Image (cartoon, rainbow, N blue to C red):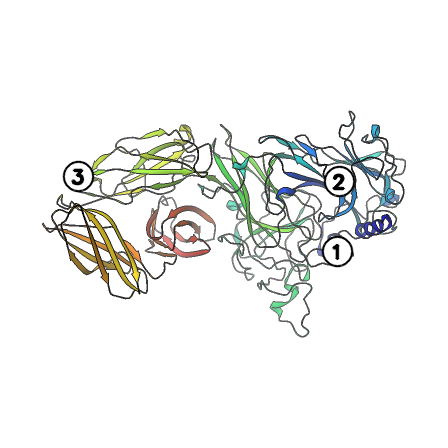
Amino acid sequence: MKKSLLFFYNLLCTIIILFLFAGSSYGQRNPILGAGNSYVNVSKRNTGGVVQTGDTLEIRTTYFFAGSYNSANSNTLFRIRYYDSVPLKTTMLSGIGDSLRLITNEGVTFRKYTRATLDDPASYIAIAPIGQYQIRINIGQHNLVPPGIPAVATAGLITNTTGAGDARIGSGATRYKPQLFSGLLITTAFRVRVTGAAGDTVVLAAGKLVYRKTSGGADTIITATPYKIFISDNNASGLCGNALGSNLASENGGTFNLGNTQNRAAGPVYPILNYDYRILSRPLPIGDGNYGFVNNLSPAGGTNFNARMQPNCAIPAGPIPVADSCDKRMFGGFWDIIGDHTGTNTSAGNPAVVPGTSGGYMLVVNSDVVTSIAYKQNVTGLCPDTYYEFSAWVRNICKRCGIDSNSTSRYNPGVLPNLAFSINDLDIYSTGQMDTVGWQKKGFVFRTGPSQTTALIAIRNNAPGGGGNDWAIDDIAIGTCGPAMKFNYQPFVGCHNGTTANLSDTVSYTYNPNYSWYKWERSTDNGVSWGAPPVPTTGSMAIGPPVNGVYKFVTNYPQFIAYGSDSGHLYRVTVATSNANLNSTSCSFTDGQSILLRVITCPPVLTTNQLSFKGWLNNNTTILNWIVTDENNIARYEIEKSSDGISFIKVGQLTSNNATPTSTYTFNDEENIQRNTFFRLKIYAISGLHSYSKIILVNNHFAFTVSSLLNPFSTYISADIILPEDGSVNMNLFDSYGKLIGREKRKFTKGFNRTMYNNWSYLSKGIYYISFEFKNTVIQRKIWKLN
């Protein structure tokens, strides 16, 4: 059994990552010496998330030595061993199967050791003597001879070389392990359980690889990075789903810009340390340890997403169309052929663009051993005591990059990307190991401190390179987790001769600190400017516990009598997490909803109180039903119909019953309904004056539709939106270059909804593009802005 294990070990170690190093013609960076450390949240391996109490972490260190390293001494590392300690706020796992291990870059175990001393080349001491490490793994020649681990008293002493073997770089001598064709790769792993409380920090214990360049020389020590990992509560998991305000991400709002050349002309704002920036071309792809900004991943400018890929480049036999050739893919048949993700909201993203045409750029990384930061920014202008969403769309771009222990391509994804998101050098979230399922939105929510206005954010490659771990990232976003707000009356309709106005707004949100501070505002110029209403109303609500995870409160504007002079005025509510934030235009929020005071001419004799007005289809004909109470001096109800919700025609009438307490009316419109059809009631008094009911919509089925879009626009954009069911609609506004300049999310009800997006007066004159997203459907229009 031991002999078979050694044979399996020899095979694996000899050819761990051929794909990483055997492809020098692809332009790999291949440093002389590379070292990096990482961790995997095993509890959330495939889904990603924050680290929480009870999670299992696998702590890894990876070291690579190129074939030319220490060539003066037969490319040999002498007395090589690894030391580490269990981080505070964690405990070593002690269950069956838990162990100290050497693994491949894909995380596959090829050498497993017990935690006990003397029985194999590794040991773990729960309470190490002062100045010593808890964990030790002897690496190298010892695997073919008795391990000779030192006594417990000195096992964790970094200067003790007992049992430490030698390891040769390259393939010259098979008895030195582990080795690769042109280099040596060593990856260690052990697992711990998080025991700290939410708010604590886990600091990796800075593991060390120790060796000598000559048999009797001094020790060389490579120290891993002591990454800091934040232990979160449930509030920090997931995404807020209602990000408001401007996107604070750099690199063109996290989109990396767009252009009509395959490679972006400008380099990165923040270079990836230890990586080389590559201009993608056919003879020089983006190899290991390189990155670039491209709008098409094909080095040959191909656009066929379904072009052949390895190992099917010549199957079936016969001529292969040029557009279907493996040559269109990176490395002759591997990477996806795709465009970026900006402007979409699905896993598919954008198709690759034809060379010379405009397309959005994305950051593409071919990972090296070193786990470096890929994106970094000092964010300014944050609001204190506020929750923000930090997210990005990420894609594993290689379905066929894995290799097996015989150095043969397995044509699977291989090493799966795993990115860590950090704030102020504190890891908050990891994406988990990402498979090749297309673009995935990953991220988390964080809270600023009571006076915090800046934050250093970063996204780091948290997995080693090799066969796989090739990925793209786009649409990085940093936005406020804002509230959802809904007016209880919209639009408000009153009478010239005076009517009581009761204005009310419901504010709801899912994160604390809460948006309990509020103020009412009024606009008399159609939403161009806003100020205090006649009765300034500002305050703070005492918020109770959440119901089904949602905090909620209702604010009412003081009741007043509306007259003709009030017609056209808009009222809205602005909220914030503190009084200071409420008075800051950048730290107070409204979702764009407003109440319109529409004061019309209507007589007091129209005292009927309509309780309901609804309609439905019966064999494609419409049945209308309405119930009224306390009718008095009502002459008749005229039924009006429209195909667009704007222009109505009379299709029938019913005489009023003038009955109390209630009257029920039914009207059947015999026309077959094949499209959206709108109905309303025109209510006549005996005096001849009239008023209108609300508008309702009927159809065989409601489809997501956007109509009556104000085009051109000046200060606001209005539209009629029809939904097949209750839900949220995302509005995205882009300039003519495709850069996202505005985004709003609103909740609407099934059927007809008329909405207005305000405050676009600051935009310059020109062409813009607006998209409306509902579920998996996107409707896009070109619109013009006037001065």
Q: What residue sits right under mark 1 in the picture?
A: 404
Q: Position of residue 539 (x, y in %)?
A: 35, 29
777 shown above or below 498? below
Question: Which residue is at a point 63% across and 53% down the rendered structure image?
Answer: 279
- Determine the CA span between mark 3 and mark 1: 82 Å
- Which of discs 2 and 3 lies nearer the camera? The answer is 2
Q: What residue sits right under mark 2 in the picture?
A: 99
Residue 490, quarter of the rendered image: top left
Q: Answer with left or right where residue 236 lies relative to residue 95.
A: left
N-term-proximal mark, 1 vs 2: 2
- In the image, farthest residue toward the bottom: 318
- In the image, farthest residue toward the left: 687
Kindly identify the amino acid type of the residue bearing the numbered disc 1. Asp
Kindly identify the amino acid type of the residue bearing the numbered disc 2. Ser
In this rendered view, identify the residue nearer to me: 423 or 71.
Answer: 423
Residue 528, quarter of the rendered image: top left
Q: Badge 1: few (under 14), some or many (20 or more) residues near its Cα, within 10 Å?
A: some
Q: What residue sits right under mark 3 in the picture?
A: 498
Q: Position of residue 672 (x, y in %)?
A: 28, 66
Q: Position of residue 308 (x, y in %)?
A: 64, 65
356 shown above or below 755? below
